[in-house]
Amino acid sequence: MFDTHELGRRPGALLRVARTIEAPADLGIAGVVGVPEGAPVEIELRLESVMEGVLVTGTARASAEGECVRCLEPVELELDADYQEMFSYPESDSRGRSKAAADEEDEEAEDMTPLEDGMFDLEPVLRDAVVLVLPMQPVCREDCAGLCSECGVNLNDDPDHHHDAVDARWAALQGLAGSLGADEKDNMSDAATGVDEKQEK
């Protein structure tokens, strides 16, 4: 929670705040990438007093951790999340304005978060800001080659890795050949040769 009492209510008054907080749980995109719970988050705030309340503008800096969606290796990202939010005075409708004027501003007021005893909670604003700057599909590097779709080898470590293509028509016979004796393999090979010769004729 942040306190606005020092700022006062004179329109135009400014207050700058710098603070390091511990990251709350689930600060990020669940199961993809986020700031670890308890990790330091550097907060810089600019509080400005206006007629309706306090306009809060700031930046949050932290390190996010996740997993590369291509090769599944750990990923660490430095993030800067900017945000702005209006926190309204709860009694703003009783400061000399007519009821008609207050009614006209009802719709605009719905977009504001009320202050509670001069305090405001930055966590919801921080969560929204962090989610907006984090990638939905983090990668360890832009040219990450990923994993081999057949055996799972990391192609970044072995760029020349490949598998010889096997004719699907003979794949079943090759599997069978592995379980046959030498004589049976020779007979199967002769049979295959005979089939090829017939096809050529």
Image: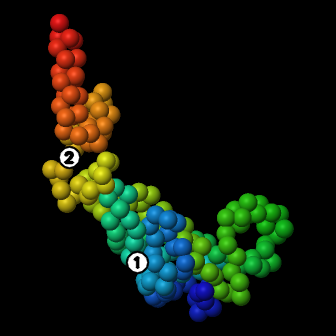
Please state if 37 lies on the left or on the right of 53 as rendered: left
Q: Position of residue 51 (x, y in %)?
A: 66, 75
Crowding near the residue tagged with mark 1, few <14, some 14–19, many ≥20 C-alpha atoms within 10 Å: many
Visible residue check, residue 59: no
Tell me the quarter of the picture where residue 102 sits.
bottom right
Q: Tell me: residue 180, above or below residue 66.
A: above
* Residue furthest out toward the bottom: 6
Where does the C terminus fall, quadrant-wise? top left
Label 1 element class = strand
Who is closer to the viewer here, 84 or 51?
84
Q: Is residue 6 left or right of residue 33?
A: right
In the image, residue 80 sits, relative to residue 18, either above or below, namely above
Residue 120 visible in image: yes
Q: Which residue is mark 1?
A: 62
- Residue hosting label 2: 162
Q: Is residue 195 left or right of residue 117?
A: left
Q: Position of residue 59 (x, y in %)?
A: 44, 75
Coloring applied to the structure: rainbow
x, y percent for residue 64:
40, 73
